[in-house]
Image (cartoon, helix red, strand yellow):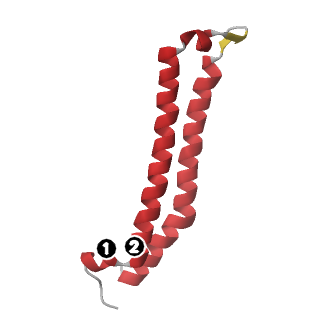
Amino acid sequence: MTEKTAHEIMEDADFKSLASQKNSISVVLAILELFLYFGFIALIAYNKPFLSSKLSGAITVGIPIAVGTIVLSWVLTGIYVRWANTKYDLLVRKIKEKVGG
């Protein structure tokens, strides 16, 4: 099996599919993450009275929202890791076998 040039690899249909899928999931997850964080910051900036309202004792509305922001960030990271382990790695392996890498 002969090794392919970088140009041939870039023109390969499997490589283009891999790049497209990776870009799609990366952009979607990045937008969700930015919306999550900037939404939280906007809430802090523009609606402090809501965040400071008490839920129970010393716990305000802002605390579970902040914790939720962190947990959702972990979930988004987990989604990417799961996708990478189940789909991305298989496609990379397939392309490597095809190009002799």
Q: Amino acid at mark 1?
A: Met
Q: Residue at x 51, y 71 (%)?
A: 90
| Quadrant of the frame with the C terminus | bottom left
> Residue placed at 73% from the left, 8% from the top?
57
Q: Residue at x 65, y 13 (%)?
A: 60
- Viewer-nearest residue: 23 or 101: 23
In front: 23, or 70? Answer: 23
Q: Are marks 1 and 2 in contact (CB under 8 Å)?
A: yes
In the rendered image, the vertical position of residue 10 relative to residue 52, given as above or below: below
- Residue 19 lies, in percent from the top left, at 40, 65
Quarter of the image for residue 16 reads bottom left
Q: Is residue 57 above or below residue 24?
A: above
| Cα–Cα span, label 1 and label 2 | 6 Å
Q: Position of residue 42 (x, y in %)?
A: 48, 22
To which residue does mark 2 refer?
15
Residue pushed farthest front? Answer: 46
Q: Earlier in the sequence, mark 1 or mark 2?
A: 1
Q: Secondary structure at mark 2?
A: helix
Q: Which residue is mark 1?
A: 10
User: Could you tell me residue 55's position as x and y percent?
Assistant: 72, 13
Q: Residue furthest right?
A: 56
Q: Amino acid at mark 2?
A: Phe
Residue at the spot 26% in from the left edge and 75% down from the top edge? 6
